[in-house]
Image: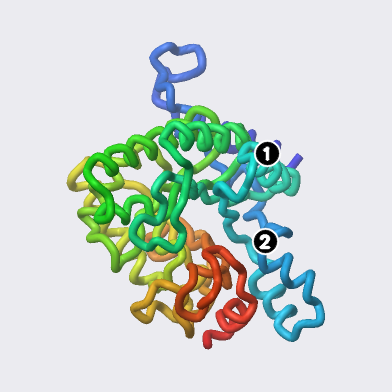
Amino acid sequence: MRRLLRTLAASAFACLLLPFGAGPGNATAPTTTTAAQADPIGMTSGFYTDPNSNPAVWAAANPGDGRAAAIRDNIASRPMARWFGAWSGDIGAAVGSYVGAADAADKLPVLIAYNIPGRDACGGHSGGGAGTPAAYQAWISAFASAIGSRPALVVIEPDSLGDFSCLSQAQIAERNGMLRGALAQFRDRAPNTWTYLDAGNPAWIGAATMAQHLDGAGVREAHGFSLNISNYFTTGENTAYGNAISSALSASYGYTKPYVVDTSRNGNGANGEWCNPGGRRIGAVSQTGGGAEMLLWLKTPGESNGNCGVGGGSAAGQFLPEVAYKMIFGY
């Protein structure tokens, strides 16, 4: 009932925002009206906490470990994004199950789509992705269809616009086509989803260049863009960068977009390293943040970037309890 009342209220408010004469019976109404009206936050009662996240599963399986209580209380019990890729198996079933569980709890899930061909072209630790553009199109279509009309936030392909220096012009054009196609799938198949294209971090690509990359990839069709995924830069550094990107979009292309910041590991800021640096700390979350639309945990604290730094010997995405534990306290 709470969900229904919120939805009705959001719909009624959205009607007040329609241009005069626009409506279901008016053939001239824009085809993207439903997507523009979507408000997944207003449709739910807060963000979803995944009971099957890697830290939650580890804490439950190791109750006698002296680190378990701290990891459970400070990481596993907090909302964070779930990443989906080839490891997810049947993507429709995996996404449908996750979003369904969140919907049943009246909570908003945050999902990361991470399966574009040539993934992590520069970093290399998370390489892989769908084998061909056609395979990716089928995968992302099933992803969007599995969400359907249920509310969700989806970040599309971290690093994909920061990797251009490691791609040929033909590969860049192909990647942009895949990203525009992905946004179209969510627009058409998941009308209550807010989508975000990833825009890297403040030390990677200049704001004006990133605005160009975002526009080429179709961010006009997205709800916004994301920053700092799997990185460590402070919230202040990210909001300065995000505001600069938005200003560049306005100056060069005539529109702006909101952005979200991944604060999962930025409590101590960055030390110049990106791959499992030591001494980092979990950061704060909020639905406001110095110009950011939201501060979210998009990377799970304690999950490895790959075989590097304090995660030596690990694989990308592997949960490392000692790293997670130290992130709680910042050492």
What's the residue type where badge 2 is placed?
Answer: Ser
Q: Position of residue 22 (x, y in %)?
A: 43, 20
Q: Is residue 9 left or right of residue 241?
A: right
Q: Secondary structure at mark 1?
A: helix
Q: Is residue 13 visible?
A: no
Q: Is 166 drawn above or below residue 78 in the view shown?
A: above
Q: Position of residue 97 (x, y in %)?
A: 70, 43
Q: Is 148 drawn above or below residue 72 in the view shown?
A: above
Kindly identify the residue that appears in the image at 31 percent across and 37 percent down.
Answer: 174
Q: Position of residue 284 (x, y in %)?
A: 52, 71
Tell me the distance, in whole angstroms, between the alpha carbons under discs 2 and 1.
Answer: 17 Å
Instruction: Tell me the residue that label 2 is attached to.
Output: 53
Check disc 1: other Cα within 10 Å, few if <14, some if 14-19, many if 20+. Answer: few
Q: Position of residue 96 (x, y in %)?
A: 67, 39
* Label at residue 93: 1
Kindly identify the residue that appears in the image at 39 percent across and 65 percent down.
Answer: 290
Name the image quarter holding residue 75.
bottom right
Q: Is residue 145 visible?
A: yes
Check disc 2: other Cα within 10 Å, few if <14, some if 14-19, many if 20+. Answer: some
Front residue of 244 and 62: 62
What's the residue type where badge 1 is placed?
Answer: Ala
Front residue of 59 and 134: 134
Coloring scheme used: rainbow
Kindly identify the residue that appears in the image at 46 percent across and 41 percent down.
Answer: 131
